Amino acid sequence: MFTTPRAAAHLVAPPVRRLDRLVQDVIAGANSELHIGGPFWNRHGCDLLREVLLPAVAERQVAVHFYAHDPSSRAQPLNDLVKDCAQYGRTSLYWWTGANPGIMHAKFVVADRATGYFGSANLTSLGLQEHFEIGMELGSTQASSLVALCTRLREEGFFAQVTKGPGRLPDPPVLVETADGKRRFGQLRSWHTARDGRREADVLCRLSDDAPRPARVRVDESRIRLFPGVNYANVPTNDACAGDGETGWVQLFLSEISGKARSSELCWSGWGVHEYV
């Protein structure tokens, strides 16, 4: 499995598998527990993980254990991700406490002690999508051995569990039907009542497999699927769709039903569709 710079993306084509897809597939396939580790984290990399982590925790009640090196302010994207996951289920964060100059430098994702990813790529947007990186898919023996080692390291004091930490309240997870007919993970920011009385959702969602990061879009309520057991009571509601500056409308074709295209509208301001950066 490989990651290459975008200019060399044509060199990583089926049957070769991209690392970001492997990592997301491992998380999406978890049924009971996940062990996720890495020394470095960034916001867009955590967004890639969040897309599949929140449904795993909220819908399948998967327990998630994070392992990281540095509890400084550079780890804030990870702290936010951990806080998001903890709103919906069992989540643990362990900081490396081993003696210097040793560091927690392993990068891995293990699902159910049965399969996983292990390789050179940090779980950042650069590591998973931009650098030249190499990784491998773990079998059951390798996956269970890695989790057993992490457990022993915790027991012998090389990792310390964080019980409380910084973070923000998450926007609750939803599934969004996008233009290619797929249902993709999104986060519900607010509800809006359109001028014609329809209710619309303001969500963060990647609109295609190749989109580098989520975009902030507005879609009709009929294109949104809520997760059972998730509390949506605190999602704010606004009465009208209004953007900063001159407001316009773009049509997003979402699916074809009975041979007829159906669409929903994206709310955009004079600077274009609101993008999550």
Image: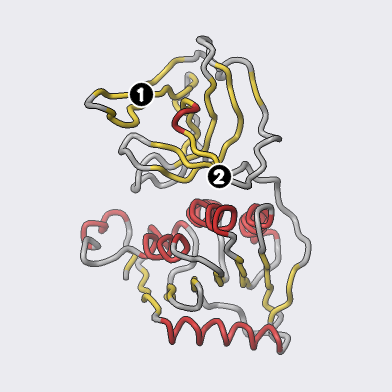
Q: Residue at x 58, y 57 (%)?
A: 57
Q: Residues within 10 Å of mark 2 (few under 14, many from 20)?
A: some
Horizontal side of 137 relative to 52 (left or right) equals left
User: Relative to 132, is 148 above or below?
Assistant: below
Q: Residue at x 51, y 17 (%)?
A: 198
User: Relative to 221, is 166 above or below?
Assistant: below
Furthest residue in direction top, as rendered:
196
Identify residue type, mark 1: Ser
Q: How far is the residue under mark 2 from the one under mark 1? A: 23 Å
In front of the other: 98 or 261: 261
Q: Residue at x 70, y 45 (%)?
A: 169
Nearer-N-terminus badge (2/1): 2
**Figure quadrant of residue 13:** bottom left
**Residue 110 location (% of width, % of height):** 49, 73
Q: Secondary structure at mark 2?
A: loop
Q: Residue at x 68, y 68 (%)?
A: 93
Residue labelled with disc 1: 263
Identify residue type, mark 2: Phe
Q: Secondary structure at mark 1?
A: strand
Horizontal side of 276 relative to 73 (left or right) equals left
**Figure quadrant of residue 5:** bottom left
Quarter of the rendering occupied by the N terminus: bottom left
User: Relative to 240, is 115 above or below?
Assistant: below
Q: Residues within 10 Å of mark 1 (few under 14, many from 20)?
A: some
Residue labelled with disc 2: 227
User: Relative to 208, is 107 above or below?
Assistant: below
